[in-house]
Amino acid sequence: MAIYAIGDVQGCYPELQRLLERLRFDPASDRLWFCGDLVNRGGESLEVLRLLHGLREHCVVALGNHDLSLLAIAEREPEARARTNPDLRRVLDAEDSDVLMEWLRGQSLAHHDEALGFTLVHAGFAPSWTLKQALHVAHEVERALRGPGHHELLQRMFGNRPARWSPKLHGHARLRAAINILTRMRYCDVHGRIDFDAKGVPGSQRAGLYPWFEVPGMRPRDTRIVCGHWSALGRFAGMGIYALDTGCVWGGKLTALRLDGDEPGFIAVDAEPHRTRK
């Protein structure tokens, strides 16, 4: 049995197929963790979702910001849905769209495996969160997404405020702050306030900002974290963080990390030749 985490696929179906072949993935015994952003930009988001839905008993998915955006678009009126890009329209117009959206809406915001000592999230955790707090907040969002009020949440989750976490937040402001942290964060200040415009490599940010996993005084977490979301960071291993967004959709690579060995090991495949580099 092998367990692999895979970085942001973003509709890059041929690369995902080649990566699974490279891993010799066997659904009878192996398991896959996905860091989110399954869809958008790559051109074959529908095929990616159908593949993962077919493997749903063997997969763990941490929702990314692009996945949540697709779920929100799926709740809109037909004329609004028609304005999205062709890749996502193919998903929304598919005969099995409702089945795929219901499955996607039931996925995680964070997943922890005590035996492996790994935690999966799309973007990151607030500096003030312990692992227990992070999982608690993630589960709050998951319950809301799966509940009868999910339509309102999906329409009200957009926005950059609140930009930092506070336990005093409540209602949709609390859920929005949690979603921003779990699915959109790259840099923040020492108080955990996110800078949504800073997206470059570490060292390019303005003074007073830190990568979310390097904030001075952050709470210790007794876990290793595997994440995606940050293509400019690329493949990264350090401080208990394993980042896997290697920019496949931009002409980079699609990367996996084996989680169950003595030492985590990276495996990657190149993007298809037609992908456009940033």
Image (spheres, rainbow, N blue to C red):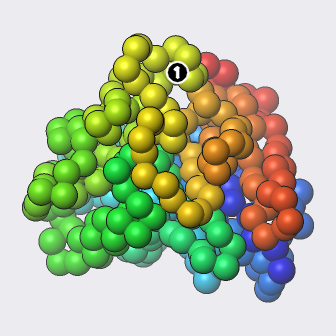
Residue name at image x 65 percent, y 69 percent: 117
Q: Is residue 79 left or right of residue 256?
A: left
Q: Tell me: residue 263, above or below residue 83.
A: below
For the question of whether residue 59 can be seen, the reply is yes
Q: Nearer the viewer, residue 138 or 103?
A: 138
- The residue most toward the front is 217
For image coordinates 61% across by 19% down, the residue present is 278
* Residue placed most toward the observer, 163 or 240: 240
- Which residue is at 19% across, 51% downward? 166
In the rendered image, is residue 55 in sight? no
Q: Taking 113 as reference, is 208 left or right?
A: left
Query: Does 176 sit above or below residue 119?
Result: above
**Residue 84 sits in quarter:** top left
| Residue at 68% across, 55% down | 6
Q: Which residue is mark 1?
A: 200
Q: Is residue 152 above or below residue 143?
A: above
Does residue 190 appear to the left or right of 157 in the view shown? right
Query: Label 1's element?
Result: loop
Can you give x and y, in whole percent of width and height, for residue 199 in the image?
47, 25
Please indicate whether residue 121 sits to the left or right of residue 134 in the image. Answer: right
Badge 1 density bin: few <14, some 14–19, many ≥20, Cα 10 Å: some
Coordinates of residue 241 in the picture (x, y in percent): 62, 48
Quarter of the image with the N terminus is bottom right
| Quadrant housing residue 134 | bottom left
Q: How many marks?
A: 1
For badge 1, the amino acid type reads Gly
Give residue 187's position: percent from left, percent from top: 42, 31
